[in-house]
Amino acid sequence: MPRRPRASRGGSGGEEVKMEDFVESMLNLGGGGEGEESEEGEQLPAADATQYKSKNLDAERRRRGRLNTNILKLRAVVPNITKMSKESTLADAIGHIKKLQNQVLELQSQLADSPGEAWEKQGSASCSESLAPTDNIHYQGQVELIPLGSCKYNLKIFWTKRAGLFTKVLEALCNYNVQVLSLNTITYYGYAESFFCIEVKGEQDVVMVELRDLLSSIVEVPSI
Amino acid sequence: MPRRPRASRGGSGGEEVKMEDFVESMLNLGGGGEGEESEEGEQLPAADATQYKSKNLDAERRRRGRLNTNILKLRAVVPNITKMSKESTLADAIGHIKKLQNQVLELQSQLADSPGEAWEKQGSASCSESLAPTDNIHYQGQVELIPLGSCKYNLKIFWTKRAGLFTKVLEALCNYNVQVLSLNTITYYGYAESFFCIEVKGEQDVVMVELRDLLSSIVEVPSI
DNA sequence: GGCCACACGTGAACC
DNA sequence: TGGTTCACGTGTGGC
């Protein structure tokens, strides 16, 4: 029963070919080499010796091909692959995403020239320029999250006042198990700017970027 | 043939459970429901009617479980998932990794370019300083609730800063379905005073006094 | 020969 | 209704 030949996993003899959707090319065998291995024909008493392909045989083949192609592409963008297997490829991708997100956060904080100790000293005058570091994502820097120390962050939010908006921000902070160490809010006509000094307890891992994006989606002006 | 039930993909009725290696828990069925469907026993002429589990049945089950767990974890760290499917999850992860890498590159270049340029970036400058404390406010009525109009109140809270205290206040406000219209907080060494302008939605009935008492019990100093 | 990772075909559930 | 996605059990090749 000639199965599809395996793609010679790297393992010890690391080949590291620039494999790019070559799986698709492997699927081009069409309907050529079919109709053999006539054994145990039991399902239907039709005269043909073939296996009565089960309605979605090639569709499933194609789906598997696409999935494997995506895994290969994923393996191509992740720098350090530990083991040449699907499972570890996914695990490495997860770790890489987390590392990249933390790196972005750290770089943004460095770029924002955060006067960290001035803010941590609660009570002293604090002056900050809320600047949009990069208009990288769709929101224009209305939320900034700047790491301070171990689990502490400065959180700056600039918004236009709307009904129930601050409540949603509070709910988001509650849901992410965030302790608010201090908060300063200034409000002027129609606008408000809040400066949180927050602390997170457990594995903050990557959830801080999630929290930042969530807050951004909350305070961003609704698309007119 | 009772297969494993499917995990009710999000799609329209999005549930968004915090799924974390719940796949592993689903794999704990062990070797319980086996031994049925005795049809076409052709492989070995043993007397038992069971299917002669092919030596690596549960190993394969475990492998599938690990792989699905990793896909779920991957879906957890990627912010915007388009479709709740394995293939698009991997595709989104690939796109997200590429975007993050470009973002890191851009941030690094911006950081390396001119360190003093951050001040010239666009953005509304804001400056806030906390007031000098007039250290004569020792009123033990730490919570004041002043009705303003229909459903609006002024809420003044004075407290000594403690860990997690403000979070509890926020939770209390959330639980009482309170909309925060505006908030000003001033903090000085060890103390903070917050001025909420809040609004309650539905039948506020008597709950406002409940809320005030709850807040008082939260912010009151622990009896030494 | 056991273990591990994989590809395969298939029934079933969901649009 | 098909089309699509999924889990399942199994065969097989490489350590």
Image: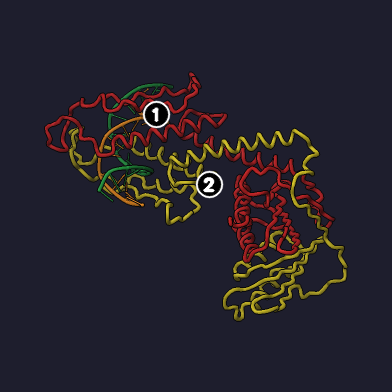
Chain colours: A red, B yellow, C orange, D green
Residue at screen point 40% across, 45% down:
B27
Residue type for callout 2: Asn
Q: Are marks 2 and 1 in contact (CB under 8 Å)?
A: no
Q: Which residue is mark 1?
A: A24
Q: Which residue is mark 2?
A: B80
Q: Is residue A221 above or below residue A109?
A: below
User: Residue drawn 77% across and 46% down?
Assistant: A114
Cα–Cα span, label 2 and label 1: 27 Å
Residue closest to the far front: A224
Residue B22: give x, y in percent of width and height: 45, 49
Q: Where in the figure is residue B89, as x and y percent of width and height?
A: 47, 42
Pinpoint residue B17: horizontal percent, then vertical percent: 48, 54
Left or right of B93? Residue B167 is right
The vertical placement of A21 against B213, above or below, is above
Q: Residue at x 62, y 73 (%)?
A: B200
The quadrant holding residue B130 is bottom right
| Residue A203 appears in view | no
Q: Is residue A211 left or right of residue C10?
A: right
Q: Residues within 10 Å of mark 2 (few under 14, many from 20)?
A: few
Chain containing mark 2? B
Q: Secondary structure at mark 1?
A: helix
Q: Which residue is nearer to you in this view: A85 or A38?
A: A38
